[in-house]
Amino acid sequence: MSYPPPPPLQPMYSADSSALRGASFGQAVQRFWTKYATFDGRASRSEFWYSVLFGVLVSIVFDVLELASNAFYFLAIIYVLAALVPNIAIGARRLHDIGKSGWWQLIALTCVGIIVLIVWFATAEKAEGDKYNV
């Protein structure tokens, strides 16, 4: 009795887990929220930095609104809490893109750690990051 041939091998990662190279502002913000708690995979520089820009713009809007009324302070707190997990997740995915573990974000708790992270976040992708494709 003969058996049918096995199905062809599928890649071990989905296209969604790879970094979105050349992401537009809208695409980056959409992926920031749709990959809310996705710590695996990779994030490109454009995806990461557009997400940072979005966070800065939202912060500026809340700062201006707080001048009008303190009620917006609570909305700002809610936004910060809602964006905490996706910010950590995109940071981990960005570090994966350069071949580093997402746990390296903890060096931000040291005096010079934030400078090191900014340099790493601005670094071009590396082939070592392929191991983080899932």
Image (spheres, helix red, strand yellow):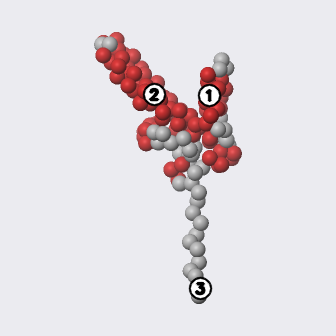
How far is disc 2 from disc 3 in space, using C-alphas?
59 Å
**Circle 2 crowding by C-alpha within 10 Å: few under 14, some 14–19, many from 20:** some
Quadrant position of the N terminus in the picture:
bottom right
Residue 68 location, x and y as percent? 30, 12
Label 2 sits on residue: 55
Task: Please tell me the numbered disc located at residue 2.
Answer: 3
Q: Secondary structure at mark 3?
A: loop
How far is disc 2 from disc 1 in space, using C-alphas?
20 Å
The residue at the point 59 percent across, 78 percent down is: 5
Q: Left or right: where does residue 62 sit relative to residue 89?
A: left
Q: Amino acid at mark 1?
A: Leu
How far is disc 1 from disc 3 in space, using C-alphas?
55 Å
Q: Secondary structure at mark 2?
A: helix
The residue at the point 39 percent across, 16 percent down is: 63
Q: Amino acid at mark 2?
A: Gly
Label 1 sits on residue: 106
Residue 107 location, x and y as percent? 64, 26
Q: Left or right: where does residue 115 sit relative to residue 47?
A: right
Q: Amino acid at mark 3?
A: Ser
The residue at the point 58 percent across, 59 percent down is: 11
**Circle 3 crowding by C-alpha within 10 Å: few under 14, some 14–19, many from 20:** few
| Res 36 visible | yes
Q: Is residue 82 above or below residue 112?
A: below
**Residue 26 sits in quarter:** top left
Frontmost of labels 2 and 1 is 1
Task: Please tell me the numbered disc located at residue 78.
Answer: none
Spot the residue most to the bottom: 1
Q: Secondary structure at mark 1?
A: helix
Count up the numbered dots. Answer: 3
